[in-house]
């Protein structure tokens, strides 16, 4: 029973079955009666499909494409926007765009047939990078200007008038690259008609998203599709909307063939043809007074959205909301642009647009400080945001901000101050520091206006209580924390609380497993429901209680102008990284990683610890070795031998610390944390490396050869920007 | 051309008539239903498919079935059925080593292989021991701690 402090670690309910390998992922299901599906994709980034030459298909083999969409069906996937086509029709806009799905019973024969397919194109010139997109290379293909979406935010006095009286203006551009999720289980999904409904099995984060997204393809209702999530071997945002891209074609294939159809990506396919983190370019213009104080910060934020908008406007918004980081500037403006290019559409990845701008502002702040000859920590400290301060959207920070306390923890643990003093710039040793936050849950009134989460608890006669909601376990531990929350309130053993992988026909829609909202929002609904259940638990044999999300009063938000309280609870973080750089090779050795986070009251300290370790390492990977280049529309790295993620040898054991800052509207005071822990380690790492080499680093990833390049050709901190 | 291949799988004599060039990974998963052997990369890089072949840790995604003829194969299913394997499983569960779980069976095999050779590994030796196994979730620290826990809990058992 969980009666003592809820933070005390429990055993995850899935730990033993996962360690023994007995838990079933989709590839472990017996789906022998299903056909195999294989997506046939565009091999060029832009052009017209002249002709699809298919080999003779033996009986029982099918090629399904846009032409098979029945009357009343629509050729799109509904992923916030509805522009992503289920099948390319007439033209193609990126390498890997789905043209059709080849289906058949024998996988080897299917591969052979696939190899024989030949598609004739009339190729057009693609735009691949942000710059090429903006320049409309090859002609604009979206909105006449290749801008999918844009927004503008302003706080305080108009920045242009501040610039007019500034003592100095610093202009700098910071860039970040693509990042691949590399969840260890590749994408997998299956679809079959069972009775009068289509049943989807999928390794996915958001079962309700899938049915809503793909139902238009057959012109049916979302309720005509049942989605069962299968044990998901990692996701990180990569299985938020992307499963729709598998499930749409599978649905049509099941309709056409009358058979079950399944698809399991191999790793190469998964890296080459799946969504990525948006590459970004942030152009700062910062006004300083004669003492080097920031008077105003102006920025232009460009995200490489790829060919389709899908969820990217929301990603861009979050990016712009976070471009001021943990700081308050007297005057601020940002303009964000989602740029259309002929690359695989970018989509959700842990942090959802916030890491890019946070990396940018942290790095820019370091560079200003170093130009002025001030320790970055001291300089950044001047601008820390506090409770009650105005945010980037003219709301206020509602909660207490414990950056000073968190800072003390990491300073003590890392000995930052001494090292920062002693390690001279360019000495081969460096220590770096970053500050970051992450707004928990959907922006503004999104939870009440769009998501409207619902959760039910069902009590059975034998005393068991089942949690019914759409939240998925994807590794983050949610299916262990929820029973913990419920068991604690009801004072019943954890074993009596049941929480299965969601099935959309059985559970209410509690919104996506995304946006660091699951514990904060849905966990709170569970705690409330358990409190409603408690007085009736002993008296009634079998009953259900339901809770619905209610937005706290008094925190207005206007989605049209992006003004007001964007987030009621932020997670906050401080990270210090220490490195040593080999002066001959540029090879970086990480000497230490320390972090402190405020994620409210911890529901389970061991689960939070594990999330922290993983997020921080993923962030350092993003900033260092995870190079993913796109050359003429094709990803150059296509396997995990050339796309390099951190191994157990690459970084030392982390020091992790937390502060206690209970959140008013979270279960036992918990806030979101899954994305927060990704958001800042990259900036701390790059700060450390750039100090070690004595050169400004303004673009990531920065693997050994680029470190070397900066060492040879980079700019000293004192040089003009 | 099909051939009959006989080997020992988790202590039991088995044989199968099939194409000896099929990947050992596929045969273990499809024909012998050893689903704990995971496919993460198909190119010997991720370690999710790790098994023991004659006591040595190998990646069966790169090995043709024929290579197992007359040999001894132990998978995560075989390991976790032993006392030593159970110590690792329990330590992983208590130590918070497990997140999405997809890399974990391979990690269990690597931990077993390491502790069987080195009952008292240092932090660095553990990190080296699992360096062929990629994990995208955990950042490795709690896996390393859990292996230390298994070493101390097992004590002399690892010397047997
Ligand atoms: S699947 Fe064998 S090493 Fe990755
Ligand atoms: S636990 Fe997910 S890859 Fe290791």
Image (cartoon, rainbow, N blue to C red):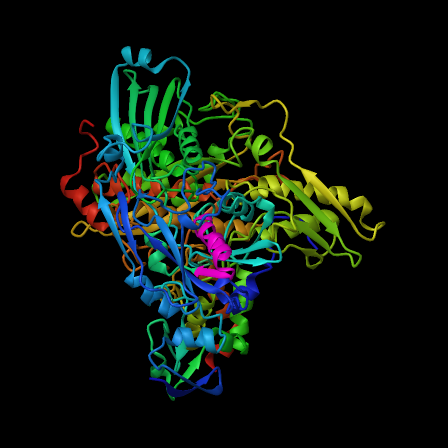
- Horizontal and vertical percent for residue A603? 60, 47
Residue A241 appears in the picture as rendered: yes
Front residue of A520 and A368:
A520
Front residue of A200 and A68:
A68
The quarter of the image holding the C terminus of chain A is: top left
- Horizontal and vertical percent for residue A717? 21, 32
Magenta stretch: helix, strand or loop mostly: helix
Front residue of A686 and B148:
A686
- Horizontal and vertical percent for residue A408? 45, 37
Residue at the spot x=54%, y=29% of the render? A400
Relative to A23, residue B156 above or below:
below
Q: Which residues are magenta?
A: A244-263
Front residue of A285 and B24:
B24
Query: Which quadrant of the figure has residue B66?
Result: bottom left
Q: How many marks?
A: 0
Residue at the spot x=47%, y=66% of the render? B147
Residue at the spot x=52%, y=26% of the render? A397
Residue B43 appears in the picture as rendered: no
- Horizontal and vertical percent for residue A173? 26, 31
Residue A247 is one of the magenta-drawn residues: yes
Judged left or right of residue A554, residue B157 is left
Residue B150 is one of the magenta-drawn residues: no
Judged left or right of residue A44, residue B13 is right
Relative to A687, residue A384 above or below:
above
Judged left or right of residue A567, residue A582 is left
Residue at the spot x=33%, y=62% of the render? A114
Extreme residue in the right direction = A539
């Amino acid at each position: 029973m969980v009666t003592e402090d809820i933070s005390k670690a429990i055993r995850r309910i899935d730990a033993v079955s996962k360690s023994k390998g007995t838990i079933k992922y989709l590839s472990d299901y017996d789906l022998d009666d299903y056909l195999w599906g294989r997506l046939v994709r565009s091999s060029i980034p832009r052009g017209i499909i002249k002709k699809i030459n298919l080999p003779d298909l033996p009986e029982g083999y099918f090629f399904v494409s846009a032409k098979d969409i029945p009357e009343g069906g629509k050729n799109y996937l509904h992923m916030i926007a509805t522009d992503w086509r289920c099948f390319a029709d007439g033209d193609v806009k990126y390498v890997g765009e789905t043209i059709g799905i080849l289906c058949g019973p024998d996988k080897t024969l299917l591969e052979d047939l696939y190899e024989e397919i030949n598609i004739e194109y009339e190729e057009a010139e693609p735009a691949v990078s942000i710059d090429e997109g903006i320049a409309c290379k090859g002609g604009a293909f979206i909105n006449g200007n290749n801008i999918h979406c844009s927004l503008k935010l302003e706080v305080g006095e108009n920045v242009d008038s501040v610039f007019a009286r500034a003592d100095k203006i610093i202009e700098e551009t910071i860039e970040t690259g693509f990042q691949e999720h590399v969840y260890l289980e590749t994408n997998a999904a299956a679809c079959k008609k069972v009775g009068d409904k289509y049943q989807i099995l999928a390794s996915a984060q958001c079962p309700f998203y899938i049915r809503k997204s793909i139902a238009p393809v057959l012109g049916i209702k979302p309720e005509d599709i049942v989605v069962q999530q299968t044990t998901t071997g990692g996701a990180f945002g990569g299985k938020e909307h992307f499963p729709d891209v598998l499930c749409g074609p599978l649905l049509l294939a099941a309709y056409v063939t009358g058979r079950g159809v399944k698809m399991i990506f191999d790793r190469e396919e998964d890296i080459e043809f799946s969504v990525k983190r948006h590459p970004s370019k942030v152009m700062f213009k910062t006004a300083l007074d004669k003492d080097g104080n920031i008077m105003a910060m102006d920025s232009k934020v460009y995200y490489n959205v790829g060919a389709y908008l899908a969820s990217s406007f929301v990603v861009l918004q979050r990016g712009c909301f976070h471009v001021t980081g943990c700081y308050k500037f007297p005057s601020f403006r940002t303009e964000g642009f989602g740029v259309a290019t002929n690359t695989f559409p970018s989509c959700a990845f842990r942090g959802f647009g916030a890491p890019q701008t946070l990396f940018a502002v942290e790095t820019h702040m370091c560079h200003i400080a170093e130009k002025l000859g001030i320790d970055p920590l001291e300089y950044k400290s001047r601008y820390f945001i506090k409770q009650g301060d105005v945010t980037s959207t003219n709301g206020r920070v509602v909660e207490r901000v414990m950056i000073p306390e968190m800072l003390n923890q990491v300073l003590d643990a890392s000995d930052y101050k001494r090292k920062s003093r002693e390690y001279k710039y360019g000495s081969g040793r460096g220590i770096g520091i970053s500050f970051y936050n992450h707004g928990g849950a959907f922006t503004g009134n999104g939870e009440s206006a769009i998501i409207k989460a619902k959760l039910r608890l069902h009590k059975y006669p034998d005393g068991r209580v089942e949690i019914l909601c759409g939240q998925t376990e994807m590794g983050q531990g949610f299916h262990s924390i929820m029973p913990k929350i419920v068991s604690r309130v009801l004072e019943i053993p954890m074993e009596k609380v049941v929480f299965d992988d969601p099935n959309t026909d059985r559970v209410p829609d509690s919104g996506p497993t995304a946006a660091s909202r699951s514990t904060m929002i849905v966990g709170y609904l569970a705690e409330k429901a358990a409190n409603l259940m408690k007085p009736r638990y002993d008296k009634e044999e079998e009953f259900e209680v339901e809770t619905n999300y209610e937005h706290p009063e008094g925190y207005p938000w206007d989605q049209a102008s992006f003004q007001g309280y964007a987030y009621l609870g932020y997670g906050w973080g401080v990270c210090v990284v220490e490195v040593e750089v080999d002066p001959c090779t540029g090879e970086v050795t990480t000497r230490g990683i320390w972090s402190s986070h405020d994620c409210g009251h911890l529901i389970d300290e061991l689960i939070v610890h594990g999330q922290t370790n993983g997020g921080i390492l993923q962030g350092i990977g993003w900033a260092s070795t995870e190079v993913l280049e796109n050359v003429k529309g094709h990803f150059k790295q296509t396997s995990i031998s050339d796309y390099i993620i951190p191994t157990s040898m690459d970084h030392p054991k982390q020091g992790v610390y937390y502060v206690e800052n209970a959140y008013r509207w979270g279960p036992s005071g918990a806030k979101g944390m899954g994305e927060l822990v990704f958001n800042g380690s990259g900036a701390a790492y790059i700060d450390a490396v750039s100090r070690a080499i004595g050169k400004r680093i303004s673009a990531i990833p920065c693997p050994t050869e680029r470190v070397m390049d900066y060492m040879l050709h980079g700019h000293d901190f004192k040089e003009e920007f | 051309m099909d051939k009959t291949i006989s080997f020992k799988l988790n202590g039991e004599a088995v044989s199968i008539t099939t194409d000896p060039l099929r990947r050992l990974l596929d045969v273990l998963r499809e024909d012998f239903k050893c689903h704990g052997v995971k496919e993460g990369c198909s190119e010997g890089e991720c370690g999710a498919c790790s098994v023991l072949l004659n006591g040595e840790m190998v990646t069966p995604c790169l090995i043709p079935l024929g290579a197992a003829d007359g040999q001894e194969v132990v998978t995560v299913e075989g390991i976790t059925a032993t006392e030593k394997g159970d110590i690792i499983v329990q330590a992983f569960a208590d130590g918070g080593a497990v997140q999405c779980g997809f890399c974990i069976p391979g990690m269990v095999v690597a931990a077993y292989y390491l502790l069987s050779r080195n009952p008292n590994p240092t932090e660095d030796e553990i990190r080296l021991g699992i360096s062929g196994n990629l994990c995208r979730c955990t950042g490795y620290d709690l896996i390393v701690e859990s292996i230390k826990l298994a070493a101390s809990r097992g004590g002399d058992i690892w010397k047997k």
